[in-house]
Image (spheres, coloured by chain):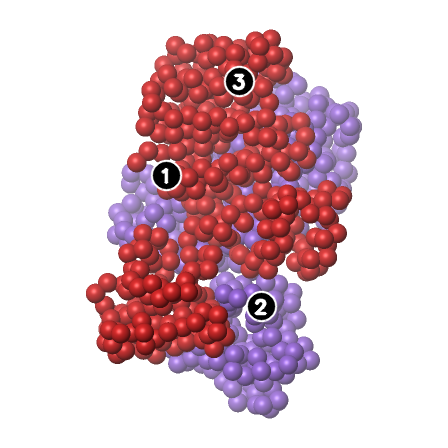
Chain colours: A red, B purple
Amino acid sequence: MPNTVICSVGTSAARRVCSPANLAAWVKEQGGAEQAGRALFNSFADVLPQGAALQDTLSAEINSLVRIGVQPSDRVILLASDTSDGQACACAVALYLQKYFPGILVEIHCIKGLQVHDAELFRREGVVNYVRYCLRAIHDFGESQVILNPTGGYKALVPYTVLIGMIKHVPCRYIFEQSSQLLTLPPLPVVFDRGPFERYRSLIERIERETAIPGDVWEQEVRYDDRVLLEPLVERTPTEVTLSAVGLLLLDEVRMPTVLVPFLSRKAWEDCLDNLCQLRDCNPFRFLLRIAADRHQFRLAEHINAGNGLRWLKPGRTTDRYLISVEDWRLLVWRAIREDQVGSDYPHKVTVDPNKDRKRLGPFTRLEFADNEK
Amino acid sequence: MPNTVICSVGTSAARRVCSPANLAAWVKEQGGAEQAGRALFNSFADVLPQGAALQDTLSAEINSLVRIGVQPSDRVILLASDTSDGQACACAVALYLQKYFPGILVEIHCIKGLQVHDAELFRREGVVNYVRYCLRAIHDFGESQVILNPTGGYKALVPYTVLIGMIKHVPCRYIFEQSSQLLTLPPLPVVFDRGPFERYRSLIERIERETAIPGDVWEQEVRYDDRVLLEPLVERTPTEVTLSAVGLLLLDEVRMPTVLVPFLSRKAWEDCLDNLCQLRDCNPFRFLLRIAADRHQFRLAEHINAGNGLRWLKPGRTTDRYLISVEDWRLLVWRAIREDQVGSDYPHKVTVDPNKDRKRLGPFTRLEFADNEK
């Protein structure tokens, strides 16, 4: 399946033509980003993407994309700064890729607020928009098909690229310093602790909806104890609060979780521990953890729609059945029963009203044991 | 309280004296790293650490340390590359800090394997040793007193510095590109999923103990399904497996957790839900989560040593009591009782043998609810 490589773009495509300090003026002289991009492309259009030229003559983006093994069937998303020199370099890289990888899909996006002169603007807009583009691509093309490549572009983007990779389970691949070698930071077993975030979710969604809220609303709504935890999620001016790049990333992961986490009702815990676990060859917990972590397996196990957002899951040719619902990133397990005990009519015999029965069956607590042998 | 700033060191201290490409030769000419460091220091010793000079004349490390607000009472740990030019620059930075911040503690460590020519050596040794030094400083001085500063030094260290900051809950602060402005990446609510790690903990500890194990032992011991999850934790050659920088970091966090996670025995869940929760003004879950996240609060609540690693906790002038033990990063809650019901002699009446009673009282499951109102 084709890959999508998301690639931040710097000015190294221009390094043989012009020094970074004079690049903006040079681009202007050429008549703008597009013409300058074409001129830059012409300066290395005949250099083949191989051997020492990758490192010595071609740009950091081209070097890294070739080492990653980009193919004509792939897609490359070039994220350029909000400056004419950054855009010119992105144009040159795109033209080069289209020449040597015919058919390749190349998109250029100029990221509003992404520049090096104003850290405040970078934080409040540039990096927020950068994260937004990365997330959109991950959703559009799927996390298993996406590679993040922060080789080119600003060093200040690297920490955010790493965070996106960790939270969304996408690998980061980049060229090691000025070498020909590729380093990979694979997705790590890292999850974020959604507790503090969830308590303020409606406030955070309001900031997203309204772009900014007054600072005093934030002060009123956020408990003093929670401020330290929540500060990373927002950017503040003396009067306003906006969503930070980190806030945007975590809000996205709450809404479109990469994996689900199972929570069992107190009744479902009893069902499993006192009944299903007595069966030979039945491990309800392993089944639930497996399908929560894998959307494909989850869909295979879906058996009967019980209405009201509830579904019965069936692991295969077994007798255990699970009545579940999904709330954001949580897989709620309401009941776990045996068909051989209840009978094939179980969907009509075991019924739950999610609104009325939540208290009676609950609380729902997380499926995670202190012992590994479970 | 004084801060400790951990600072990766590059070669920007030499940028006014010599180009990066010729620096190693220049250092040799001077008679070695120490003499060259002194010569570099002399080239900017009279430039005050203020105004435009910070950005224009002084090194990236000095610029960032001054913007971070380093004081004479602080400690700065300079992590230099395994090269004579890196060490010369670190010497120059140290001499400068000692001149302008008299009394400041400055340590220089040369990180074995940290260089730009060999990505393999960087991965297998350089970055592993870098992580080791950072972790040691965090343990020695406490995560609330440490700041990570990856402004200077190799770009390839930035992702690892970010990971350390996330997992150990330490802020990263760095200068935004070539500006005078500081960016801060605060600790985020991120935790790592210890499940897959724990299943192989003894194998991972063996690699750490023996430095390397044969590749075929790894293949035999790690289940096929688990390989993708475990690959980030190790580095592989055709014949050997060693611990990666990420593996070292996660092993450290399993052994010396920044926060504890509470797990309740099935009996303790019943104790809480059916008994303690009936009391007005008693929220056992909030208490347990609070003390698990805060070592100081935990120590304040410790009441009676019950032997065998078990302790009774007392929240304050209340009647609820908790029999707990700590296993690595887990806070196990064995029982939760009311003194007004059991009597002041409760430590003798309610007893647990952790070896014998684990099955009877268990399983222990994680204290985390699907509803926030709990």
* Three-letter residue code for mark 2: Glu
Q: Residues within 10 Å of mark 3 (few under 14, many from 20)?
A: many
Given residues A46 and B121, the one toward you in this image is A46
Is residue A94 at all visible to an observer of this figure? yes
Where A88 falls versus A159 (above or below)? above
Q: Residues within 10 Å of mark 2 (few under 14, many from 20)?
A: few
Residue placed under numbered mark 3 in the picture: A88
Residue placed under numbered mark 1 in the picture: A145
Where B269 falls versus A11 (above or below)? below
Mark-to-mark CA distance, 1 and 2: 38 Å
Which residue appears at 63% of the width and 48% of the height?
A207
Mark 3 or mark 1, which has the lower sequence index? 3
Given residues B52 and B306, the one toward you in this image is B52
Between tags 1 and 2, which lies in front?
Answer: 2
Asked which quadrant contains residue B87, the reply is: top right
- Residue B373's disc number: 2
Given residues B307 and A21, the one toward you in this image is A21
Which residue appears at 37% of the width and 74% of the height?
A351
Please state the chain letter of the residue tagged with numbered disc 3 in the rendered image: A
Q: Secondary structure at mark 1?
A: helix
* Three-letter residue code for mark 1: Gln
Asked which quadrant contains residue A116, the reply is: top right
